[in-house]
Amino acid sequence: MRYYKHISIICFPLTVLLFLNACRKYLDAKPDSKMEIPSTVKDLRAMLDDVATMNLSWPIAGEVAADNYYLISNNWSSLSSVTDRDNYIWKADVSNDMDWSLSYRVVFKANVVLEKLNDIVPTPAEQEEWSRLKGSALFYRAFAFYMVTQEFAPPYDHNTASVSPGIPLRLSADVNEISTRASVESTYSTIINDLENAAMLLPVNVPYKTRPSRLAVFALLSRVHLTMGDFSKAASYADYCIKNGTQLLDYNDVNPNTDEPLKRFNNEVIFHVAANYSYCLDPSICKVDTTLVTSYANADLRKPIFYRINSDGSAAFRGNYDGSNSYQLFTGLAADEVFITAAECLARQGKNTEARQILNVFLKTRYDKSTFLPVTETDKDRLLSIILLERRKELPFRGIRWIDLRRLNNAGTENITIRRQINGVVYTLPPHDLRYAMQIPSSVTAIVPTIPKNPR
């Protein structure tokens, strides 16, 4: 039987947790009479160990909008979720309320923990746990802010970040605090500051992969700085992870002929979270992009491990690090992303020898060892192209492709246009399109005028 370590003694009604709307409408609901008020270190640990809230309800709209897959018209038309249908064809004003509200629910609980910790004078026996709780809360808040930013704020551009609107930075559990959108620069600065502080409080490793560790902090910092185009810092944080215990699975030792070749909490996982369910991404109708499937060489072990061939010849994804049969996609932090990020960032800095070394260590675990030939490319641009292709093949359906599309198009290096065809109509999402910043949910902007919508 599968299970998560799940301890929860505190329950907040959803109407309270939609605090960001800063409206009395959400404050009228009375708390459950059985709710226990957190007052001890043990209570606060229980709040953060609420896996259903903190680890299993992360944003999914970016993955729905990305180019890892396609739907046939009949399946798209029969989707019961209007939000999924609209995200698939990039409608201008889709209201992704669930991604927004559940992310800020994580922020809310993190803020409660941070504020309650300030009221607790830990005993010597509690000091270590107190520090870990503070570090964990800072990590959760930063991760949630980052994921909201990737959907609802424009891509990071150092030329405009100081004036472009980012997201509301809720740094207090006070539901009456008025929300405004910080700049993109302030948003990323807050995320980085929270993570840097968390790193000083958390141990390198933790006993449960649903809890943050210092490795998780540095893996996320590597992703954040890659998103910002700071390749030196992204490479440094990735290098820390590689040198301090991140492990790669050797796919030569993985049996692709089982129902579930990739297990939950496998050795590559650094920090485990999974995304909200999407009807679009259900393996019964979600067909993997043909160009992506055909990009794997015959000796590439990822193809039979990641994909199941359907009766019509299309492919269904099963390479889910939440377990191949899970209905939720793994969108956490793992060693494979760290290695491929390190290789990309080294190549972008012209450190070709180091980039090839990291890349080949990684690829040796993904190709048939009896025929594997290391990459020997010396030209910087061609090496980078190889690395980006390997990144594309390694990280589908991880919640990362949307982030990559935003940053690569914004840098002007890829210029990728996505196309969908539904009922004879072709829909496109070109580079630099304003829809790469999804619309702030109307349920928020309708009652909080200090949070403006994204331009269209």
Image (cartoon, rainbow, N blue to C red):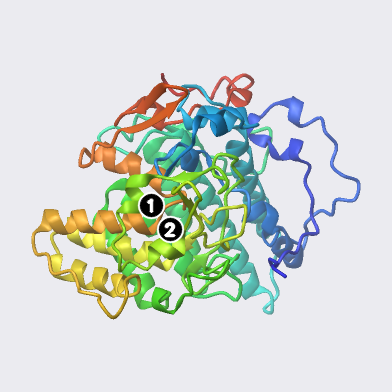
Q: Is residue 288 above or below residue 40?
A: above
Give the camera-side residue of 277 and 244. Answer: 277
Q: Which residue position is annotated with label 2?
A: 220
Q: Which residue position is annotated with label 1?
A: 224
Q: Are marks 2 and 1 in contact (CB under 8 Å)?
A: yes
* Residue 180 shows up from this direction: no
Q: Secondary structure at mark 1?
A: helix
x, y percent for residue 104: 61, 42
Dot 2: few (<14), some (14–19), or many (≥20) neighbours within 10 Å? many
Quadrant housing the N terminus: bottom right
- Residue 371's image quarter? bottom left
Q: Residue at x 81, y 53 (%)?
A: 37
Q: CA distance from mark 2 to mark 1?
A: 6 Å
Amino acid identity at mark 2: Leu
Q: Residue at x 12, y 65 (%)?
A: 377
- Residue 116's image quarter? bottom right
Q: Secondary structure at mark 2?
A: helix
Amino acid identity at mark 1: Val
x, y percent for residue 53: 67, 52
x, y percent for residue 441: 57, 27
The answer to whether residue 7 is left or right of residue 305 is right
